[in-house]
Image (cartoon, rainbow, N blue to C red):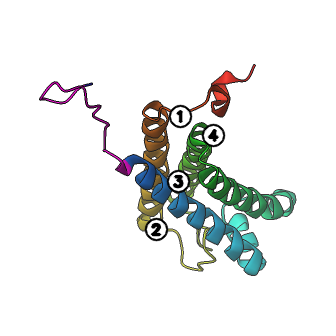
Amino acid sequence: MTSASGRGRTVRPLGDRAPWLAGAASIVTAGIYGYSAWTKWAYPDAFRRALAGYGLSDPAVTLTAPVVPVAEFALAVALLLLLVWQAWSWLEVGLWVATVGFLAFTALMSWALANGLGQSGCGCFASAEPLNPWDIARDLAFGAIAASGAFLCRVVRNHTPSSTPDDSPESES
């Protein structure tokens, strides 16, 4: 794309802000997942009560309670490392994984709220407050931040001349 004056200057969407905005979305998303994992480790009984409040059986709570915070923490660390390494393609994938996670949590909370469950809280940040529509709105907003970051990673990747082919998940066979 050239400028209006026709001098051949490349016009980049969002100018040079796309990497900064993608980075900010990644940091915010990593912070949310990291804090969520920490609260589950710091207050394991509250998280177990929340899981039981969703109607999970005791064996399901026993299996799920340690796995969820480990997965959340691993995703948070991965997002930060991918940002530091400027691996935009993989960061995009990580942000889409985070988006799917937020949407899955939102669907679970919506189902629980519709069925009168979730009186022990959502299980996200060690809150003992019963589920409410604001919890759903909050997770939708978190998902929007992560999805925006993923889209911005695509913008950065498509408009960075120094991108190498091996930076892309699609380049692996």
Rate crowding at label 3 as few (under 14), some (14 to 19) or many (20 or more) other CA atoms within 10 Å: many
Which amino acid, by three-letter code, is at mark 4? Trp
Residue at point 71% right, 64% down?
A: 51
Q: CA distance from mark 4 to mark 1?
A: 16 Å
- Residue on which disc 3 sits: 106
Res. 169 image quadrant = top right
Which residue is at 49% across, 35% downward?
A: 157
Q: Are marks 3 and 2 in contact (CB under 8 Å)?
A: no
Left or right? Give the position of 19 relative to 27. Answer: left
- Judged from this view, the residue extending furthest toward the front is 7
Q: Secondary structure at mark 4?
A: helix
Q: Main secondary structure of the magenta part?
A: loop
Amino acid at pointer 2: Asn
**Nearest to N terminus: mark 1 or mark 2:** 2
The region drawn magenta spans 2-17
In this rendering, which labeled residue sits more in front, label 4 or label 3? 4
| Residue at image point 66% right, 59% down | 76
Label 3's element? helix
The numbered mark, 3 or 2, whose residue comes first in the sequence reads: 3
At 58% across and 54% down in the image, what residue appears? Answer: 105
Query: Which dot, 1 or 2, sits closer to the camera?
Result: 1
Q: Are marks 4 and 3 in contact (CB under 8 Å)?
A: no
- The quarter of the picture where residue 42 lies is bottom right
Can you identify the residue that label 4 sits on? 90
Numbered label attached to residue 162: 1
Indicate left or right for 45 with 154 as reference. right
* Circle 2 or circle 4, nearest the eye: 4
Q: Nearer the viewer, residue 135 or 18?
A: 18
Estimate the spatial distance between the alpha carbons at disc 3 and disc 2, rounded to whole Å: 11 Å
Residue 125 in view, yes or no = yes
Where residue 101 sits: x, y (%)? 60, 49
